[in-house]
Image: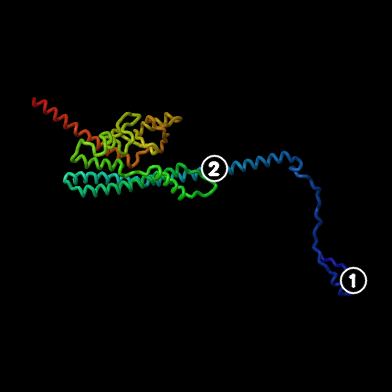
């Protein structure tokens, strides 16, 4: 709407008095009513608190779920890394066995220098084997002990700390490694069969030849020798060996107390950590070979006795 107002006497003053005014209907004024919250503040305060509480719970549950996912992923990755070198460990063991067989043949030919070189090669392989096993132990420990926190985890620092713990705790002397002792015993027996090696008792030699790689030679549930098990499995935690079907049935029956059935072993068992690892079959095959070698002298002795009786 165009509104003209004038309060001047001259034309110039008249035209400057022209003013454009937009036509807007006057706004209706309603009486200000108090909101429902103001009318009942206690009720709405409680409602707001409940909403905030639900929101806090949802946020907390989401946070816990994410933390749980992180723990699962970290432990799965650590477990994968700890088992990735199993094929390498198997090859190291097979190579040590081959070097031992070659050394025995060299000893028969009195080629002492070659035997010494083969023993040095075994020491190098044992050092590599120790590094692989140490890495597996470190990764397994990192996965088992991981707990999510508010800050980013420095995994390099964690791994270095676990390495230092293992080195300080073991400080393994490879000269006393059971595989090296078995190598030396095999060479020694070429010319000194039945005699203990210098500095060792007969019992020490027996322990070395019968317990390499296996903590138990009999399944604690079935009573079978581990060499006779149809499906041997080994605990990743305590390293004891069982028949697969028997140990899984044992775990299903003993859900509350799932400790290892080997007497005196305090370790708890989990079905997903009782497996047939790559080294287990190698250990069992080595035990079969050792048992055959141990049984052979007895067979010849019985045969000789039988011949003597016949001659009389």
Residue 300 position within the rendered picture, expressed as x and y whole percent measured from the top left: 16, 32
Q: Is residue 249 visible?
A: no
Residue 165 position within the rendered picture, expressed as x and y whole percent measured from the top left: 42, 44
14 relative position to 147: left or right:
right
Q: Nearer the viewer, residue 63 or 200?
A: 200
Q: Determine the secondary structure under disc 1.
A: loop
196 relative position to 252: left or right:
left
Q: Which mark is residue 135?
A: none
The residue positioned 14% from the left and 28% from the top of the image is 305
The residue positioned 31% from the left and 31% from the top of the image is 218
Badge 1 is on which residue?
8
Asked where in the image residue 86 lies, by quadrant, the reply is top left
Cα distance between the residues tagged 2 and 1 = 80 Å
Q: Earlier in the sequence, mark 2 or mark 1?
A: 1
Q: Mark 2 against mark 1, which lies toward the viewer?
A: 2
Badge 2 is on which residue?
64
Q: Determine the secondary structure under disc 2.
A: helix
Q: Nearer the viewer, residue 144 or 34?
A: 144
Q: Is residue 235 visible?
A: yes
Residue 159 position within the rendered picture, expressed as x and y whole percent measured from the top left: 44, 48
How many numbered discs, if any?
2
Disc 2, disc 1: CB below 8 Å?
no
Q: Residue furthest left?
A: 311
> Pointer 1: residues within 10 angstroms few (<14), some, or many (20+)?
few
Asked where in the image residue 107 lies, by quadrant, the reply is top left
Query: Which quadrant of the figure contains the N terminus?
Result: bottom right
Q: Residue furthest right?
A: 9
Residue 123 position within the rendered picture, expressed as x and y whole percent measured from the top left: 29, 47
Q: Nearer the viewer, residue 295 or 39?
A: 295
The residue positioned 81% from the left and 64% from the top of the image is 21
Query: Which quadrant of the figure contains the C terminus?
Result: top left
């Amino acid at each position: 709407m165009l509104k003209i107002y004038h309060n001047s006497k001259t034309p110039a003053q008249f035209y400057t008095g022209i003013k454009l005014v937009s036509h807007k209907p006057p706004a209706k004024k309603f009486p200000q009513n108090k909101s429902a919250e103001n009318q009942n503040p206690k009720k709405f305060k409680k409602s707001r608190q409940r909403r905030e509480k639900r929101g806090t719970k949802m946020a907390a549950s989401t946070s816990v779920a994410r933390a749980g996912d992180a723990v699962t992923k970290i432990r799965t990755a650590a477990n994968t890394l700890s088992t990735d070198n199993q094929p390498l460990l198997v090859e190291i063991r097979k190579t040590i066995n081959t070097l031992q067989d070659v050394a025995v043949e060299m000893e028969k030919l009195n080629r002492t220098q070659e035997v010494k070189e083969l023993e040095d090669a075994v020491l190098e392989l044992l050092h590599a084997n120790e590094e692989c096993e140490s890495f597996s132990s470190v990764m397994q420990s990192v996965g088992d002990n991981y707990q999510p926190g508010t800050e980013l985890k420095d995994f390099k620092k964690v791994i270095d700390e676990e390495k230092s713990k293992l080195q300080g705790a073991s400080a393994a002397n490879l000269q006393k490694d059971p595989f090296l002792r078995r190598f030396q015993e095999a060479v020694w027996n070429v010319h000194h069969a039945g005699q203990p090696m210098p500095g060792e008792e007969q019992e020490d030699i027996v322990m070395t030849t019968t317990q390499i790689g296996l903590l138990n030679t009999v399944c604690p549930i079935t009573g079978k020798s581990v060499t006779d098990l149809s499906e041997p499995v080994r605990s990743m935690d305590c390293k004891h060996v069982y028949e697969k079907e028997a140990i899984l049935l044992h775990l299903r029956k003993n859900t509350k107390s799932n400790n290892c059935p080997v007497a005196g072993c305090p370790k708890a068992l989990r079905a997903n950590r009782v497996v047939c690892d790559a080294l287990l079959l190698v250990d069992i095959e080595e035990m079969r070979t050792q048992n055959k070698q141990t049984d052979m002298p007895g067979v010849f002795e019985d045969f000789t006795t039988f011949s003597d009786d016949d001659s009389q």
